[in-house]
Image (cartoon, grey):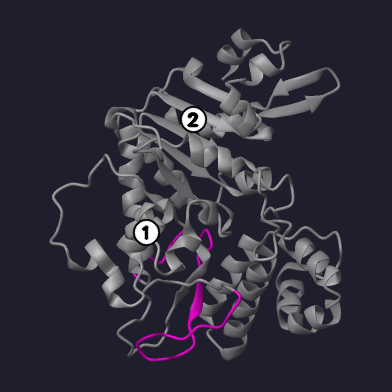
Amino acid sequence: MNKMNNTDKTVYILGAGSSISHTNNKSPTIEDIFIFGKKIARSFDIYKQYSDRYKDLGKYIFDFFGLDMFTVYNKINVEDILTSITISIEKYPNPLVYKIRNDLLDLINFVLTNINESLTGDYYTFKNQLKKNDSIISFNWDLLLDNILGRLLIWIDNTDDKTNSLYHNMFFNRFAAEPEYYLGNMGNSPPEREINKGQSVYLKLHGSIDWQYCNKEMCRGKNKLFPVFLPKAKHYCSYCYALTQRLVIPPLLNKQFDKYPAIGALWNIAAKELQFAKRVVIWGYSLPKTDFYSDWIIRQARIGDIKELVIINPSVIRESRTGENINYPFVRKFYSIFRKIIEKEDCKLYTSHKDFIKKQDVFAKFPLLDKNNYLNLL
């Protein structure tokens, strides 16, 4: 990575759109998980097993949302379903609703582990343009970026490359617990007076399909975070040997930080990283209205000395009969977070990561757009 002064820190915030861009639209949105699941099952000629496997989940979705997850073109927001199931567990815990939650997490894993890895996608360019103290905050569950940042090197024996893995340095040593000697600084260091603003961190705030935890009350490994090499396989707690569970967090108002201490630590560090940022780049993230914690975390950048906001998303432009126009409602929901902090001309818009690398913003890409009008209306 290139060297960078600590005062020039960039924090990248990634949503599903970044993985979609990386795979050239072969990765799902949160509304396409079930559609992708059906297509993948049919491509493997296992659709009958697929529909039988997830029939209880399908009944739950139909009963509570009036939607048929087995209808080919039904768009269903998987975060809404996961949130609803999580609340059902809190209010009316029973074996069936736990099974339904596990079925949904299994389906998400089935889809995201069957995305074809791109060998030339945007994440390779993204990795190469990272500078020494840049940090990444991701709301994605998939492993596309993780693998490019060196996730797989962690599991390769007898190699020095793992010490240079971004994923290893940014995440694994500080937050993993597989077993306790992986706790590193988090478990053994004394309290810190301040967090080093020169660090580079990779933070997945909504969990990941390769993270597991033990939910057994009397186990000393309860709710600790265990990254695994093979997310498709079953895993067992290294303390009590019970079957572990996948750690994927829905966008609830209550993020259950007390339940998963490692997740709480990730959010705390994300807040600090944004407070140190000079530039925030939001790539492929739509900021759902109901995800109040994500809104709060982005606002932490107001506390520091942020100078520039970059939005990379095709949704910054809307098509009309008269041509391309700025999608003001979409852009404003991000700029409003930084109003009175960032000048309007320092809110940069790009429709793709490729354009961002080429420094071709929307006004260079679409010459008919009126920048002065944009500055007045923003």
Is residue 131 positioned above or below 14 on the image? above
Image-quadrant location for residue 340:
top left
Residue extending farthest to the front is: 158
Res 373 quadrant in image: top right
Residue 247 picture location, percent across and down:
49, 70
Q: Which mark is residue 160?
A: 1
Q: Residue at x 43, y 62 (%)?
A: 255
- Crowding at mark 1 (Cα within 10 Å: few <14, some 14-19, many 20+): few
- Left or right, residue 268 beside residue 154: left
Q: Is 241 one of the magenta-colored residues?
A: yes
Residue at mark 2: 336
* Amino acid type of the residue tagged 1 in the rendering: Asp
352 or 349, nearer to the observer: 352
Instruction: Choose the circle earlier in sequence order: 2 or 1.
Output: 1
- Residue at (72, 72) in percent of width and height: 61
Which amino acid, by three-letter code, is at mark 2?
A: Ser
Q: Which residues are magenta?
A: 232-258
Instruction: Bin the neighbour count of mark 2 within 10 Å (Cα to Cα): few under 14, some 14-19, many 20 and up.
Output: few
Residue displayed at 18% across by 67% down: 188
Is disc 2 placed on a helix, strand or loop?
A: helix
